[in-house]
Image (spheres, rainbow, N blue to C red):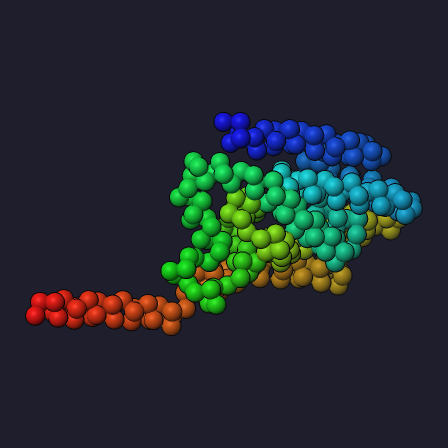
Amino acid sequence: FPQTFAPILMMLVLFPLSAMLVLAALFTLPITASLPRTLSELSQLGHELQAYSESGFRPKAHVLGVLSLTALWKHAWSVPGSVLLNVLSGVLMSPVAGTVLMTLLTALGSVLSTLLATPLAPIISQFLPKALTLTRNALEGGDIYTVSSRDKSPGWVRLSVLRLIGIVPWSGINIACGVTGVSLFDCFLGAFIGTLPWTAVTCQIGDIMQTVVSSTSSADPETLASLLHSPNVVLKLAALTFVSLVPILARDRLKNLITRAPEHEAESKVAMVKDAKSKRWWYKQWRAR
């Protein structure tokens, strides 16, 4: 009993300790806004953080450090709210820099989540062995009787596709990788590639929101209509639309990439079965004589 449930006890201890560390880091930021629940509150928080970060190198490093720590913690423990952090990064940095940073943090947080879920594998294999086997086959591309090792797609490709098409929640993929023993390299690379488009979308939203706020609060404010027709905002909206639609439009192709078995593999299996049946028939005829 103690050995079986020791991982659960470890999780119950690590989670509050890590949460206290993140909360202590958040309280070091000189902000007056509370946890944002609306776009206006999020805009106010972004404005305060941007004003503080622009006062020098150390304040900027302070904000990015706390932001990074919070993002890692949220992804490691599958806590909702990472989208708000992506939007804030789009407010504080350029869309490219914010996308790269938050995608890297998402991938690292996914690896941490996988490591945290690894000790739970014996418990799940004891109580849910069939579910564990099905999950392992789904992540590894089938067993040795369905697809040969040279034909099935690599693990990181399958993980990337699963995140892109959005069938399985990202937190579920992280936990499944931990309990099925998927390599950390596949977890990291699959998370980085698979979460890149959606992270880019949310960071671009933050950048557009910051553009709107700064334009309307300036000494010579623009109207919303003129702002939306400006080339800069139109280009950002076009990029946002393109990046968000690519995974949706390519969903069927991505599914086929991880579910389609090679035709020549299927044909060879049928031929092998027929040959085995033929040999057994001839053997029975020979014994009958």
**Image point 56% across, 42% down: which residue?**
118
Residue 163 seen in the figure: no
- Describe residue 265's horizontal placement relative to residue 173 as left or right: left
Query: What quarter of the picture does the C terminus occupy?
Result: bottom left
- Describe residue 253's horizontal placement relative to residue 7 as left or right: left
Residue 47 or 190: which is nearer the viewer?
Answer: 190
Residue 71 or 139: which is nearer the viewer?
Answer: 139
**Image point 51% across, 31% down: which residue?**
4
Q: Is residue 254 above or below residue 69?
A: below
Q: Is residue 112 above or below residue 271?
A: above
**Image point 53% across, 27% down: which residue?**
2
**At which x and y percent is residue 242?**
62, 62
**At which x and y percent is residue 52?**
87, 41
Residue 285 or 23: which is nearer the viewer?
Answer: 285
**At which x and y percent is residue 283?**
17, 68
Q: Is residue 216 above or below residue 236?
A: above
Residue 132 seen in the figure: yes
**Image point 76% across, 61% down: which residue?**
232
Q: Is residue 19 above or below residue 228?
A: above
